[in-house]
Amino acid sequence: MITRLVRTAPPRALLLLGLLLAVLLAAPLALDRYLTSVLILVFWFAYVGQAWNIMMGFAGLLSLGHALYVGLGAYVAATLFVKLGIGPWAGLWLSAFVSVAVGAAIGWLGFRFRIEGVYFSLLTIAFAEVARIGFDHIGWTGGAAGLFLPVSAEAGAWFNLRGGPLFFYYLALMMATAAFVLCAALRASRLGYRWLAVREDAEAARALGIDVFRARMAAVLISAGLTSLGGVFYAFYYNNLFPGQVFDISRSIEMILAPIVGGVGTLFGPVLGAFILTPLGEALIAITGALGLNAPGTKAVFYGVCLMAIVILAPNGLWPALKRRLGVPEGDV
Amino acid sequence: MSALLEVRGVAKRFRGLLAVDHVSLTVNDGEIFAVIGPNGAGKTTLFNLIAGVYAPEAGEIAFAGERIDGAAPDAICRRGLARTFQIVRPFPHLSVLDNAIVGALLHEHDVDKARAAAGDVLRRLELWDKRAQKAGSLTLPDRKRLEVARALATHPRLLLLDEVMAGLRPTETDRMVAVLKDLNRHENMTIVLIEHVMRAVMALANRIHVLHHGATIAEGPPEVVTRDPRVIESYLGQADHAVGALG
Ligand SMILES: Nc1ncnc2c1ncn2[C@@H]1O[C@H](COP(=O)(O)OP(=O)(O)OP(=O)(O)O)[C@@H](O)[C@H]1O
Ligand SMILES: [Mg+2]
């Protein structure tokens, strides 16, 4: 599978990818702690953006509640760790399982009862909101007051996802890279073709023998599972969880901006979008902080402006526009 | 010859309008069968019943000896009954080749092999040179060809073609006729076609079934059906189907 991908990928894209990876692997040597933390965020958003893109970009299903899977993944793994002493490498399986199960429920409701288009999106929001409110009231996991993980940065505790910035840097880079490769493989697979067909025209896909329900369900399950692993990372990186933060609709929106800005349905889009938006957002926070401005809505306004600019200037996202300049052939990445 | 498709007394109503009025027909294995009739006669609706888009309100449909009425369109396609859409439905943002690959992947699990098979189908329908184009950028005649190519790529036993010649120039029509004849002769493909272009119908069909207001008014070999007074009155008598043009 991977060898086929490498064989069929346009050489320029491979070159670009190799260069980027080499630079990022070496980058911590030259970066201070703050910049390292910004890049960790970039990788995280690239990762979850890639996961979301499987549903939207490949299968044409707009989820506006992906924070649900981040939150579930985070809470399940963190709770197992804090309350039962079960480490995250074991806990992530339950995290993924719970998210996949909830994704299956949403998919089943949506696709069996033909809740399509915007109504499906509303359904995803509804589930995320219910989870947010629910976790606010679950005393065992701390409720609205939050759940905290014991902080210990000593080396060697990688098996509990405990470590310093460098550890999380390489973990996040690995996750983003793996998600990229996985999405490339999925897109070039039989299932990938089915997704694209369903996205383009479900009725025509059906006439070609594609089980639309199954194709859509597969997209939801894979996307939910992957996103929940992003949630596990989130919990162990930040060491604190608040339902009002992880499950919030603003997080769902923040997660999908990178792929939208970069290019929905492309492989480089979520990566490019994360590299542009996250540093800009962080810079904005730094600047407003330095100026002593304390306007809580600044970031949201900024994202809104970015989105408007993209919709007007490059409606398919930045990567498709950039791709033409780089001479990468149409439709391949 | 054995029956491949049997339609027995199917009916479908749209808000009181009986679009298909208890129609029965039998298509034999290896035959080319045409369905003709004026606009709104219920031809496309009949296809939609066979292909599983609608379940018939009355009657039954059997394909290769098994009941398919009420089955989902994808399940019917997997059994070997492929259809094209009169109002073409390409996957607009995918390349022509990828459109055909989607069809070829129905029975072929290996993407490389499906790509090769899709290429063969595109060559057959003279779309190979346009394989890298986005399907949405094709001209209407090319989209019609792509409809056929995509359906063909699923390796069906029976192909339902809904007005694939409409909008084609006479020379293009002749080429499509040649392609279909070749498929029928050399690959034993059974074809049911809805067609207004009588030139093509006369060149291809072993038998013709005529619908009018949802009901059957005639069925038989071309030379018999085209002389049927009721067919001439309701359909062929119309200016654009002057019998003289049947050639
Ligand atoms: N989805 C629908 N809803 C309501 N009425 C419909 C629908 N589909 C078809 N009809 C009606 O059913 C009748 C038969 O339509 P149909 O499309 O089957 O005709 P046709 O023979 O294919 O015509 P044409 O030669 O114009 O393609 C028409 O009166 C049409 O208006
Ligand atoms: Mg019609």
Image (tube, coloured by chain):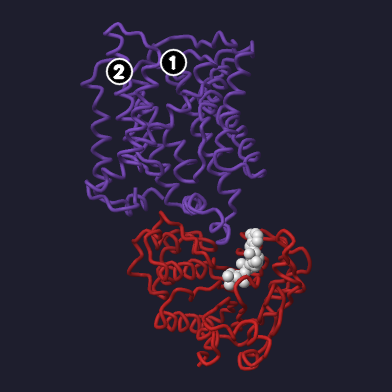
Chain colours: A purple, B red
Give the quadrant of residue B170. Answer: bottom left
Residue A76 appears left or right of A52: right
Which three-letter amino acid code belongs to the residue tagged 1?
Tyr
Residue B28 x, y percent position in the rendering? 66, 82
Q: Secondary structure at mark 1?
A: helix
Chain where mark 1 sits:
A
The residue furthest front is B239
Total labels drawn: 2
Along the viewing direction, whichever of B205 and B117 lies nearer the viewer:
B205
Give the quadrant of residue B162. Answer: bottom right
Give ligand 1's quarter of the image.
bottom right
The mark that comes first in sequence, 1 or 2, is 1
Residue at image coords 63%, 19%: A134
Which three-letter amino acid code belongs to the residue tagged 2?
Leu
- Label 2: how many residues lie within 10 Å, few (<14), some (14-19) or many (20+)? some
- The residue that label 2 is drawn on is A284
Along the viewing direction, whichever of A118 and B68 lies nearer the viewer:
A118
Give the quadrant of residue B86. Answer: bottom right
**Marking on residue A238:** 1
Is any atom of residue B51 visible in this view? no
Q: Is mark 2 within 8 Å of ligand 1?
A: no
Chain where mark 2 sits:
A
Is any atom of residue B115 visible in this view? yes
Between the C-alphas of marks 1 and 2, the distance is 21 Å
Residue A262 x, y percent position in the rendering? 34, 37
* Figure check: B58 above or below A158: below
Residue A76 x, y percent position in the rendering? 57, 22
* Figure check: A287 above or below B41: above
Q: Secondary structure at mark 2?
A: helix
Residue A171 x, y percent position in the rendering? 38, 26
Residue at image coords 36%, 50%: A5
